[in-house]
Amino acid sequence: MPAETRKLLKLWSDARSRGEECALATVVRVAGSSYRKPGARMLLTRGDQRAGTVSGGCLEGEVTRKIWWLTEHGHAVRDYSTSYDDDSTQSYGLGCDGVVTLLLERASGANEVFESLRNAVERRIASAMVTVVGANDATILGKRTALAEEPPSPYSNGHLDDLDHLLLRIARETLCARETRTISAQFRGSNIELFAEYIVPPPALFVFGAGDDAQPVIHLAHAMGWEITVADGRSNLATHARFPLAHRVAVLSANDDLQDLAIRSGDSAVVLTHSYIQDLSILRALLPMRLGYLGVLGPRRRTERIIDEVAPSFGVDPAIALESLRSPVGLDLGTGSPDVIALSIVAEIQAALTRRSAAPLNLSSSLAPAIHG
């Protein structure tokens, strides 16, 4: 959802700058099959602008029509059934066979949401946000606490009541677990339902090599909403004019240790320099890092030669070092143009980051519900 989050934040910022009211819908629970998962959001303005989705087109029209009056007196939680044979008034008969629960609210009361999203996108700081989405006491519906990973302090006015302490404890647990879930808890003798969301920064992709074949990779990564850095030792190629969609373009020095790039554990890197000497230097720096993905363009035999040279320098068996990277880079989509190669690379990175097999969904019935809706 990184690209969608960027669009949502831009619409929110633009609307706020002109004083236009917004409303926010968030998926907080899914039962059965659904196109979107908990944490998906849709922002609406009074002028009928929209960013984000909460379904595959099933619910957006209904939410757009009713969100303003449903939130007139505060937060609202609604279940929407998309089962074909459901006769309830909340059914849309679209055959998706699921129930989607939405939290509906005015954006003016959701500052913690936008601050958490902006922290993730602009400062690359993860956070946890816990919201009351079910309670007998309507006055606490929509109450929330957000806790940033860096620094570990909640967005609050300094006064914490009993509910704040409960939400803060769940937020700390969510930061440790690094997962989004809906849970039940006891508060003053009653059961309440909480949406505990782990908000992560967009994936960061470091593209080493500023040749023409890197440009379609950058275009696709930008469409995904990723944080993009392009780096190359050739200053005539590594320019913002050639890569206007990249967030950062860097010129590497000889034997650069890449420390100035501030690569983090879990980030992705793809090496496309077409230069044996550059690849040697870059992989010497990258291999010791705990990357979420590392891919190297070129024949496997060429990469093996490089690894044989660099792995001993940090005490790792070359065979083990080879297991930590993808070479040749990309999925097997058939030979083709740089655009096809770029698609195969970005698809492989996405599969690696989400720990998916990249196998066709029709080969596994257990995966099929993921694209319904």
Image (cartoon, rainbow, N blue to C red):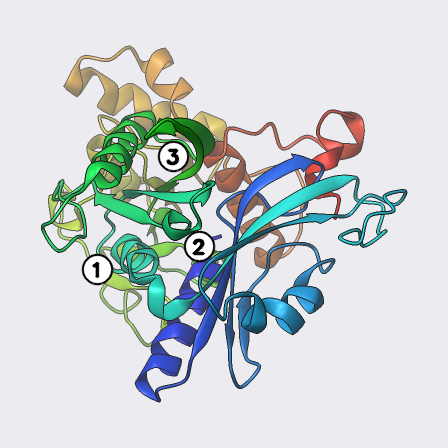
Q: Is residue 308 above or below residue 353?
A: above
**How many marks can you see?**
3
Are there few (<14), some (14-19), or many (20+) residues within 10 Å of tag 2?
Answer: many
Q: What residue type is labelled 2?
A: Pro
Classify residue 194 by image quadrant. top left
Which residue is at 66% across, 52% downward?
336
Q: What residue type is labelled 1?
A: Ala
The percent position of residue 133, horizontal first and vertical second, equals 46, 44
Judge by depth and name the residue closer to the eye, 311 or 195: 195
Which residue is at 74% across, 48% downward?
373
Classify residue 242 by image quadrant. bottom left
Which residue is at 24% across, 19% downward?
311
Q: Name the residue under label 2.
A: 2
Badge 2 element: helix
Q: Name the residue under label 1.
A: 250
- Structural distance between the alpha carbons of marks 3 and 2: 20 Å
**Dot 3 and dot 2 residues touching (CB under 8 Å):** no
Choose mark 1 or mark 2, whichever is in front: 2
Which residue is at 57% across, 81% downward?
48
Are there few (<14), some (14-19), or many (20+) residues within 10 Å of tag 3?
Answer: many
The percent position of residue 16, horizontal first and vertical second, equals 34, 80
Query: Label for residue 329?
Result: none
The percent position of residue 154, horizontal first and vertical second, equals 17, 46
Query: Label for residue 294?
Result: 3
- Structural distance between the alpha carbons of marks 3 and 1: 19 Å
Badge 1 element: strand
Q: Which amino acid does label 3 sit on?
A: Leu
N-terminal of the pair, mark 3 or mark 1, is: 1
Judge by depth and name the residue closer to the eye, 91 or 358: 91
